[in-house]
Image: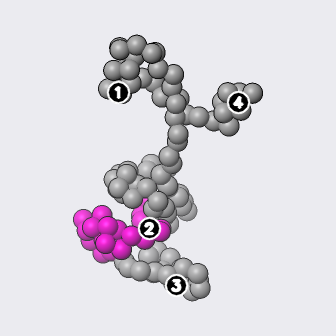
Amino acid sequence: MRELVLETISEQPDIEVIGVVEDPESLVAEVEQSRPDFLIIAQGEAEERPQVCDRLLDRFPRLKILAVAADQNLSVCYRANLDICSQRVETSEEGILNALRGRILWVPITESSRSSRTN
């Protein structure tokens, strides 16, 4: 499968293969050094995110990861997502300290919540 993916990608004029990692243990170090836009890895169990995705996306939030499972005819693309959240905080010593200590429930800001606050 690796050869087929490499062959397909290398024929694309707008995509450059910058490396192939043989040893999974060195994957994070290789990504750190080369800073690719995209990483292609083997997908393990069907629909289950490979554990390495969390580690990589936490350290490299702009990275996109394509996980391929040829035997299952499955490909899944993973990326980090930054949500801007807000929460009203009680204007008191306790409320402010709770916010600073992370003891509040954050709510993602959506387009509808933004427009309702501005209207």
Q: CA distance from mark 2 to mark 4?
A: 40 Å
Q: CA distance from mark 3 to mark 1?
A: 49 Å
Tell me if residue 58 comes above or below residue 100 in the rendering.
Answer: below
Question: For mark 1, does the 10 Å Cα neighbourhood hold few (<14), some (14 to 19), or many (20 or more) residues?
Answer: few
- Amino acid of disc 4: Thr
> Does residue 96 belong to the magenta stretch?
no
For this rendering, which residue is in front, 45 or 118? 118
Mark 2 touches mark 3? (CB < 8 Å): no
**Mark 4 residue element:** helix
Tell me which residue sits at (59%, 34%) in the image. 109
Mark 2 touches mark 4? (CB < 8 Å): no
- Residue 72 visible, this orientation: no
Q: CA distance from mark 2 to mark 3?
A: 14 Å
- Amino acid of disc 3: Ser
Q: Position of residue 13 (x, y in %)?
A: 59, 85
- Amino acid of disc 1: Leu
Magenta span of residues: 21-46
Where residue 100 sits, quadrant-wise, is top left
**Mark 3 residue element:** helix
Mark 4 touches mark 3? (CB < 8 Å): no
Q: CA distance from mark 4 to mark 3?
A: 49 Å
Residue 10: which disc? 3
Which comes before the other along the chain, label 2 or label 4?
2
Which comes before the other along the chain, label 1 or label 2?
2
Residue 100: which disc? 1
Image depth: mark 2 or mark 4 in front: 4
Image depth: mark 4 or mark 3 in front: 4
Look at mark 4 in the image and give the residue it sits on.
118
Which comes before the other along the chain, label 1 or label 4?
1
Look at mark 2 in the image and give the residue it sits on.
39
Q: Position of residue 56 (x, y in %)?
A: 36, 57
